[in-house]
């Protein structure tokens, strides 16, 4: 029983490890070349696959004729996609004898599309999860095989939530890949009336609007904090990145939004509602952010305004 893996990131690595533990034959792995413009904080699926002696391919477009021919020659029982970044079209979806399935980082039909972990935090969700579902031509719209929910804690960041989802994905794949191969896996249509879609995020989407309430700003901060590009504002014409903060929803400095005040030695920023206490900031988003609570001198001065 063979499974071809289309994957990337830690989620792709988890999937491959599960397949190896299950004793499933993996004749090929299709993945992506790392981009020099991206912060590569995650493990390499290509290196992991090579360590197992599995052939690795880097298609620019998995739907091109040459890759369709390769997949047809392999003739897998299942195609499993885990954080693969290309839409898979009909020529590929029709190849596996049993199913083409995808592992998605939300409880579908909510948060279909790109960057589900980040978007769920931006919107202040309290629950996330993973969904193993059949692939169809419309993104993340296929019948559900299984889901596993995880709690989003108030201090979760995109990184910590992603780690929770990795563990959930491992549990789902361990149970349901064998059932899929045996033809015994459940299959439940999604309620498309409850679907929500979100697109990819860009570094510039991390711009803070201090007129929003403190909780909404904090949700953005934790959604894009390291190892993502970071939430930012401007101070004296320079980008200031906010890596960690705390919400003081009932505190009012009596200042316009964006003004900084010192309360009991703590650096506070007035927002549209409540205040945000700054815990970790820097003028650079390169490398791991400082976590010792120190602040640049510029934001400790009286009447500083963040824009």
Image (spheres, rainbow, N blue to C red):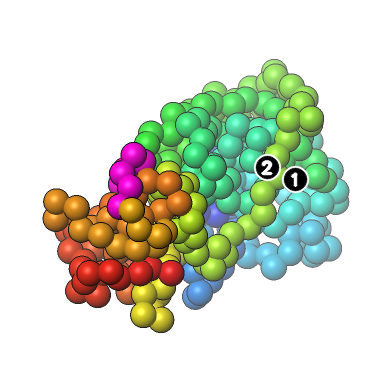
Q: Considering the numbered disc 2 on the image, is that residue within a helix, a strand or a loop?
A: strand
Disc number lying in front (2 or 1): 2
**Mark sitting on residue 240:** none
Q: Is residue 306 left or right of residue 140?
A: left
Distance of mark 2 from mark 1, alpha carbons? 7 Å
In this view, the residue in front, 134 or 129, is: 129
In-front residue for pair 183/136:
136
Q: Is residue 179 above or below residue 250?
A: above
**Is 4 one of the magenta-colored residues?**
no
Residue 158 in picture, x, y percent from top left: 44, 48
Q: Which quadrant, please, contains the C terminus?
A: bottom left
Where is residue 138? Give x, y as percent. Answer: 80, 44
> Is residue 242 visible from the viewing direction of this image?
no
Q: Position of residue 90 (x, y in %)?
A: 85, 48
Count of numbered tags: 2
Could you tell me if the residues under marks 2 and 1 are in contact, i.e. CB atoms within 8 Å? yes
Residue 112's disc number: 2
Quickly name the residue at label 1.
Answer: 139
Task: Indicate whether 207 appears above or below 273.
Answer: below
Residue 4 in the image: state x and y as whole percent. Answer: 65, 46
Tell me if 71 is positioned left or right of 20 in this view.
right
Tell which circle, 2 or 1, labels the residue nearer the N-terminal end: 2
Residue 178: quarter of image? top right
The segment highlighted magenta reads 245-253
Residue 199 visible in the picture? yes
Mark 2 residue crowding within 10 angstroms, few (<14) / some (14–19) / many (20+) = many
* Residue 162 shown left or right of residue 130 in the figure: left
């Amino acid at each position: 029983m063979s499974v071809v893996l289309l994957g990337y990131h830690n989620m792709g690595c988890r999937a491959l490890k599960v397949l190896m533990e299950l004793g499933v034959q993996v004749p090929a792995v299709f993945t992506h070349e790392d981009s020099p413009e991206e912060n590569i904080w995650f493990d390499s699926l290509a290196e992991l696959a090579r360590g197992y002696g599995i052939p690795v391919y880097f298609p620019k477009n998995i739907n091109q004729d040459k890759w369709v021919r390769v997949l047809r020659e392999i003739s897998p029982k299942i195609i499993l996609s885990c954080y693969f970044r290309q839409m898979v079209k009909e020529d590929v979806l029709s190849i596996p004898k049993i199913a083409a399935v995808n592992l998605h980082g939300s409880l579908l039909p909510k948060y279909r599309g790109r960057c589900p972990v980040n978007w769920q935090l931006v919107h202040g969700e309290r629950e996330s999860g993973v969904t193993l579902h059949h692939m169809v031509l419309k993104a993340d719209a296929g019948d559900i095989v299984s889901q596993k929910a995880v709690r989003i804690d108030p201090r979760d960041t995109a990184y910590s939530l992603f780690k929770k989802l990795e563990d959930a994905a491992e549990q789902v794949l361990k149970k349901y890949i064998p059932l899929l191969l045996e033809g015994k896996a459940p299959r439940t249509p999604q309620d498309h009336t409850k679907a929500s879609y979100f697109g990819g995020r860009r570094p510039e989407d991390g711009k803070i609007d201090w007129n929003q309430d403190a909780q909404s700003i904090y949700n953005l901060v934790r959604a894009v904090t390291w190892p993502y590009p970071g939430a930012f504002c401007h101070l004296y014409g320079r980008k200031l990145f906010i890596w960690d903060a705390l919400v003081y929803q009932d505190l009012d400095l009596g200042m316009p939004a964006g003004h900084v005040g010192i309360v009991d030695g703590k650096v506070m920023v007035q927002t549209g509602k409540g205040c945000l206490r700054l815990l970790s900031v820097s003028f650079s988003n390169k490398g791991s952010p400082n976590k010792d609570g120190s602040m640049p001198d510029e934001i400790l001065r009286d009447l500083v305004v963040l824009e």
